[in-house]
Every structure is written in C-alpha cells, then in structure tokens.
Amino acid sequence: VQLQAFGGGLVQAGGSLRLSCAGSGRSFSRYNVAWFRQAPGKEREFVAAINWSGAMTRYADSVLGRFTISRENVKNTVYLQMNSLKPEDTAVYYCACGVGQVVVAILKHQYNYWGQGTLVTVST
C-alpha cells in the first residue's frame, strides 16, 4: 500500500484546510486510516482515525469539534477537514493505514504504512 498526503499550506488562524490521503491498491478500502502530525521538536502525535467503512471515528482531544475525518472508498481517499485552525496546529501531517485492526487504533506502532507528509502552517 502506498499513501500520498496532500493539501497542506499556509493559512491564517481561524481558517480552514482540507487534507487528502490517496491510497493505492484494492485493499486500501479495507484498512483503517489515521492522521498523525509532528510539530518541530515534538513527537509525532495522533490526530484522527477512521475505520474501513467510515462508520467509526476517533479524535484527539485537541482537535475534537474542529477537525473531521471522512473517506470515499470509491476514490481510495481519506480526508481531514480542519476548521478553526490555531497556530498550535502547525505541523507536518501524515496519513497512515493499519492492517488487520479490530478497533480504531491511535498509536503509531499500530499503523503499517505511512505517507510522506504535508506541511500545515497556521499564522497568527
């Protein structure tokens, strides 16, 4: 499975961005997918995740109510809609997919394949 994340950019605080994660392969639609982010000098952290069907989602407390994860399996794409962005949301955002997950995981080591990351910069 290969993943490509795109859609990052520079946005003012309070603005919105939508990230996309395009997956290759017929199996992509059967995998859970998550977004993680890594700010300079910090550990990579969980942001949001969605199960294979789109019926179950999980969010980090820091983004709950502001970010929405969704997917279109016919397009092999997962989205992260980010609203009310804050400067502390500035980071490189990575998408990842997990094989064989029973539940929607939030830990990095539970994800098998990673995209290259897309930079989101939120200015004051």
Image (spheres, rainbow, N blue to C red):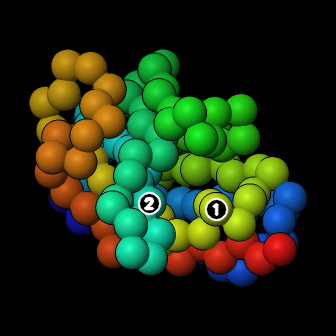
Q: Which residue is mark 1?
A: 88
Which of these two is toward me, 47 or 68? Answer: 47
The location of residue 112, given as percent across then percent down, is: 15, 51
Q: Name the spot of residue 34 as percent of width and height, x first.
A: 38, 45
Q: Earlier in the sequence, mark 2 or mark 1?
A: 2
Could you say which disc has been placed on residue 77 in the image?
Answer: none
In the image, 10: left or right of 47?
A: right
- Residue 56 found in image quarter: top left
Q: Please give the name of the residue rendered at 42% of the width and 37% of the height, measured from the top-left corner.
A: 49
* 57 relative to 18, above or below: above
Taking 45 as reference, is 57 left or right?
right
Hey, which quadrant is residue 24 in on the image?
bottom left
- Rendered-image quadrant of the C terminus: bottom right
**Nearer the camera: disc 2 or disc 1:** 1
Amino acid tagged 2:
Arg
Q: Which mark is residue 37?
A: 2
* Residue 27 appears in the rendering: no
Q: Quadrant of residue 69?
A: top right
Measured as percent of width and height from the top left, residue 93 is found at: 47, 65
Q: Residue at x 50, y 36 (%)?
A: 60
Q: Secondary structure at mark 1?
A: helix
Instruction: Name the residue rendered at 64%, 62% in the picture.
Output: 88
